[in-house]
Image (spheres, rainbow, N blue to C red):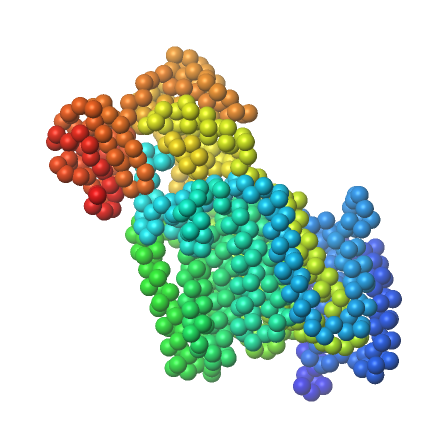
Amino acid sequence: MNRLQIWFASLWAVLVAAALLLALHTNGRLIRIEWLAQYLWLLPPALLAVMMARRTGSGVARPPRLGPLLICFAGLLAFLVSSAVLDKSFYFEVWQPDRALPSPFGSGLTRFVLGAALLTPLFVRGVRRVWLVLLALLLAGQLFCLHGFLETTGARALYCDDHPSFMFRLREFADTFPRLVNYNPFWNGGAKHTSGIVSGVHGIGFLTWPWIRAHAVHDVYTPAYGILFLLVVPWAVAASVSAVGASRAAALTAGIVALGVSQEFYLWALHYGTIGAAFSQAMLVPVACLVFRVVCLGRRDRRTWFALTGALFLLVLWPPGALMGAALACSFAIHAPYWTWRRIGFLLLSAVTALLLYSPWLQSLLFHNPVLKFTVTPPDAALVEPVLRGRTAWAAGCDALCAHLRAGHPVLLFFGLGGVLAAAPRRLRLWFAPPALVLAALTAWGPVWAPHLQLHRMAIPFFWLLVPPAAVAVAHLLTADRPALAPVRAALVMLLVLTVLNTRSIYCNRGRFRYSVLDHHVARFAQWIAANVPAGGRLLFTGPTHHAYFKGHVAYLPVLSGREMMACDYYAFPPEMVKYEYPPAGFRETPEAMLRFFDLYNVTHVATVHKAWKERLASCPGLFSETARFDYVTVYRVAREPVPLQGAPGSVRATWNRMDVTLEADADTVILPYNWVDGLQVTRPAELFPGSPEAGIQLIGVRPRGARAFRVSYGSLPD
C-alpha cells in the first residue's frame, strides 16, 4: 500500500466515522464535553504506553493497515460521549455519568474509562495470547449470564406477550411432529392450526425435542431459552467466524458480542417472546460465513456441507429468513471471478438438500396458511400514512434506520458497519457490505411500502451480519503487539467486559424491556379453571384479551388447565385478519344470541377484564352469575347445563387431530361442538357430515349407524 492509498483509506475512514456520528446524533450538543473529560483518566496510562514504546524501540507510529481501524476506534470513543447515548434505545444500560446513581462508579461510561485505565498497564507489558483472555471472558460471561437468568426467573417459564403462544406451539410440535398442519381442538371449537409454520418455532422445537417431548413445555422453556441464546448461539457464531479463516481472537470476540447484538434483539426475543424468529435470524451468521468459506476460500469439506445445510434449513424455518439469505446473492454475484463448477455444485447440493428438508413446510405455507396471503397483500393507504406522517418515503426511511442503528452494539456500529465500509480487510468488505446494505434498506424503507411484512425486524439480522467483520477488525487491534496501542486494546477488552455485564443485567430483568414469569397468579387461575369448568365444557373470554390476562396471551392456558377455551385473539392476530371483539358478530348483540352461541360450543363459563362487559354480564343475573375474581379478571358461570353432544348423551375427549366420542345411547345423528374442516374422517361404520345448526357455523355431524364409540380424526385414517 503506497502513501497515497494510505491517505485515501484514512480519509475515507474519517468520513465514514463522522457520518455515523452525525447520523446517530439526537438533539442538543453532538459531543458532551463534561463526559469527554472523563477520558482524562486514560491520559496517564497512555503516556506510560508511549514511554514503554520508546524504551523498547518499537516507536509510536501506527502500522499503515491499522490506520482506518484506529480512526473507527476514535469514532467509537466519540460516540460513547455523544448525544446518541441519551436515546432510550442506546445499547448499554445506565451509561450516562450524570444520572442519579447510588455510586459514582455506577455509570457505564465511568466503569469503561476506569477499567480501561487499570487494564492498560497489563497490555503495555504485553499479553501474548489475548485469545486466552477472551476465552475466559466468554466462558465466564456465559455462565455468569445464565446463572443470573435462572436465578432471577427461578427457572419458571417466561410468561409475557408471545411467550405463552410459543410454548403452545412447542407443545403442538412435541405432540404432532412430523405433522405440520393439525386440527387444534383447544381453541374456538377447533380449526386447522398452522401458526408454527410461519413463526420459526420449529427450529427451537428440533433442538429441544427430547426435552419438550418428555416434560411439560413450561417446565423446560426458560432453561432451554438460556442454553440456546446464551450458550449455543454465541459458540455457533464463534465457529462461523473461525470458518472464514479468522483468528481465535476474532472468533471469541464474535462469541462475546453474540450474547446480544442490539437492544431490539432483547426486545423481540426476551420481552416479546418471538424466539423462533430470533433464533433463525442468528443463523444468518453461519450461512454467510460458510458460503464465504466455499466461494472465496474454496473449502468444500464434509463438515462445511453439513453445517451449511443445517444453517440454511434453520434460517428459512422462519419464512422471512429467505429474504435474509437472498441478500447474500449480491455478494455471490460480485464474487463471480471466484466461481468454479465445483464450488457452485457444492453450494447447489447444499441448497437443494436444505430445500428438500424444508419442502413440507413450504407446501404447508403455500397451501394451508392464511398469513402468507395476508402478508403479500398490498397495504391500504391508511397503513402507509402513519409511517410517513407527512414526510417523504426517503426521509421516513432514513429516520427509521437511524433509530434502529442507535440500538445496536457500539462495536458493531463502528467496527462492523464502519468496518465493512472503510476498515475491514478488503475481502470481508466486499462480501459483507452488499447484504448489509440490502438489509439496511429493507429495515428503513420496507415498512413504508410493505407494513404487513414487519420488515423493520430486519434490523436484527442486519446487526448479526456485522458481527464477523467487526470481530475481525477488533481482533486486528487486540493482537497488534505494540505497547503504544495498549490503551486501545485495554479499552476494547473493557467494552467486551461491559457487554457481558450489560447482558447479565438484561437477563436479570433490570433492562429497559422487562419480562415476567409464570407465577402463582397464572397457576391459581389455571387451577381454578381445571377445578370448576367441567370436562367437555369451555371457558370463553369476552372482548379482546391482548396481554390483560397476566401480561401474556392466553394461548397456553388450555395446556395449564386441561380445558378448551374460546377467544378472538388467543394469538396476536393482525387486526386486519381478526375482529377484536368476542363473541363474534351476530352472537353478542343480545343475551339470547350469546346463549345460543354458548349452547353450540358448550360454553359454561365466561371471563372478562373489560368494564363494559362486566356491567353487561352483571345486568343479566338470570343468565350469568359471578363465581370468581382474580385481580382484575372476573369469571361468570353461564346458567346452562353442560351438553357435550347434541343429539345424544355422551362425552368427547379431544386432542390434536382427533376426537374420541363415547355415546350412552343410540342416536341417528350427533352434532359435536367442534368446527367442520375438510379432511376429517371417522371410524366405520359411522359417517361424517357438516352440520349447520346456525347460519355461518358448520359443526361436525356424525351418523353413528349403531356405533357407541368412534374416533373422528384429521388428515389420516383413524386407528
Q: Residue at x 74, y 77 (%)?
A: 481
Of the 4 image quadrants, the one containing the C terminus is: top left
Q: Is residue 60 left or right of residue 253?
A: right
Residue 104 vertical position relative to residue 303 in the rendered view, above or below? above
Q: Residue at x 36, y 60 (%)?
A: 358
* Foreground of the two, 604 or 364: 604
- How far across and how far down the image is residue 105, in percent? 80, 51
Residue 447 vertical position relative to residue 582 in the rendered view, above or below? below
Q: Is residue 518 visible?
A: yes
Residue 535 vertical position relative to residue 349 in the rendered view, above or below? above
Farthest bottom residue? Answer: 2
Farthest top residue? Answer: 622
Q: Is residue 27 left or right of residue 193?
A: right
Q: Residue at x 54, y 53 (%)?
A: 227
- How far across and how far down the image is residue 505, in percent? 66, 48
Q: Is residue 349 left or right of residue 665?
A: right
- How far across and how far down the image is residue 23, in percent? 66, 60
Q: Is residue 696 visible?
A: no
* Foreground of the two, 521 or 669: 521
Q: Residue at x 42, y 51 (%)?
A: 210
- How far across and how far down the image is residue 633, in percent? 51, 25
